[in-house]
Image (cartoon, rainbow, N blue to C red):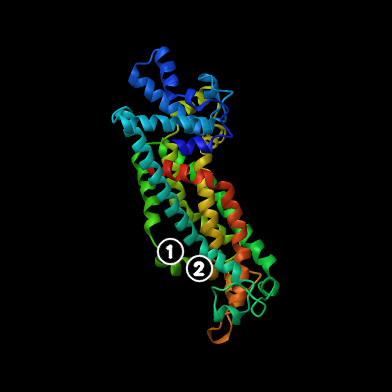
Amino acid sequence: MHDLLDKTTKVINTDYHSLSVDTLIKYNEDVGYDETDAIAVTYDDLKEMTRGKELLLYKYDLVDIGEPRIVGRYLLNQLKEKDKLNPGYLPASLKKSVSKKRREYISNTILYVVLTLIAAIVFFPILMVVMNSFKTNTGIGLNSFLLPNSETFNGFKNYTRGFEEAKFLNSFGYSLFITVFSTIFILLFTSMTAWFLTRVKTWWTKTIYYIILFSMIIPFQMVMLPMNQIASTLKLNNIFGIVIIYIAFGAGLSTFMYAGFVKSVPIEIEEAAMIDGCNPIQTFFKIVFPVLKPTTVTIAVLNVMWIWNDYLLPNMVLGTSPGKTTLPVAIQMVTQGSYGSTDYGMLMAMIVLTIIPVVVFYLFGQKYIIKGVTAGAVKG
């Protein structure tokens, strides 16, 4: 107690003996609380005061005494001293609440530490890629975990060489065109399909729905060879044809997620729209589709990340010529040398340039992801 008084000498401008927690307790008793509740209310108010809540100084007429944190800490210490001298002075429920809050604080602290460590583990590889993109191949080979120094620093040479050899702008255009139009058509077609299959309840709509779900569990490796032959026969081995193939492969998961969310949309708003004169197309685009925004953004992010980073399908359908295929394929081709050698510096530099667009897109849509995924999973 005396140590606390010494520390607060410059802040509290009053006679310390006249500043008593009993005065605050008496005030709460006068306004209608019994003795136990008055002590509990006083304790809670003092805790808030230690957090800087100045309004409580006005409640107890302590405005001219000092800062709320110091006053609250001083009086709270008096309450704790009373409880030490007279065990049971503080209500048992209050002690349980304090103990619970302390446990919650400790558990939250542990959780934050664990999540911080997990985040560090996740971001460490990304940091390694960025760091090594500025190093020579020799520097990466000697120790890829060290920061670039005067001997291993390669400046922006990896970026400039990769930009030219991979024909980055042409490959970027291919990736952008395929990703944007594939995602747009997936969102459009699967949302309409999910709405129809959810609202029209017949045996054949259920059959179609389950067939679409079944397509989700078939691995791509099982169908890639016949798919490649069919794509070649139907002349789909071009920038427009691969969009159709992506729509087919993306339909299963997207329809499933949309169907789950559509079930949470009240059918009454659609009936009201139809009463007002909307036909089914108008009802969907003016009423239903705007409500599907969280799931739409979620599905868009998932499909953009998948299509943009996909390597196997463009490699089989479009070929491996830099400038006439997508970025992942072009990067792989220009960084692979003879006899299995790899230009890791240029590879890291091209990876950095490739992930920037999808990371930016993800950051803009991340707040909808958990909401959309949860809605689709629970309602399906």
**In front: 81, or 241?**
81
On the image, which quarter does residue 173 sit in? Answer: bottom right
| 184, above or below 175, in the image | above
Residue that label 2 marks: 312
| Whether label 1 touches label 2, CB < 8 Å | yes
Give the image location of residue 59, x and y in percent. 51, 19
**In front: 121, or 158?**
121
Q: Which image quadrant: the N terminus?
A: top left
On the image, which quarter does residue 77 sit in? Answer: top left
**In front: 50, or 325?**
50
Q: Residue 262 — which label?
A: none
Neighbours of disc 2 within 10 Å: few (<14), some (14-19), many (20+): few
Residue 234 visible in image: no
Name which residue type carries label 2: Leu
Instruction: For marks 1 and 2, give the CA distance.
Output: 10 Å
| 24, above or below 367, in the image | above
Name which residue type carries label 1: Phe
Give the image location of residue 104, x and y in percent. 38, 41
Residue that label 1 marks: 220
Give the image location of residue 142, x and y in percent. 55, 81
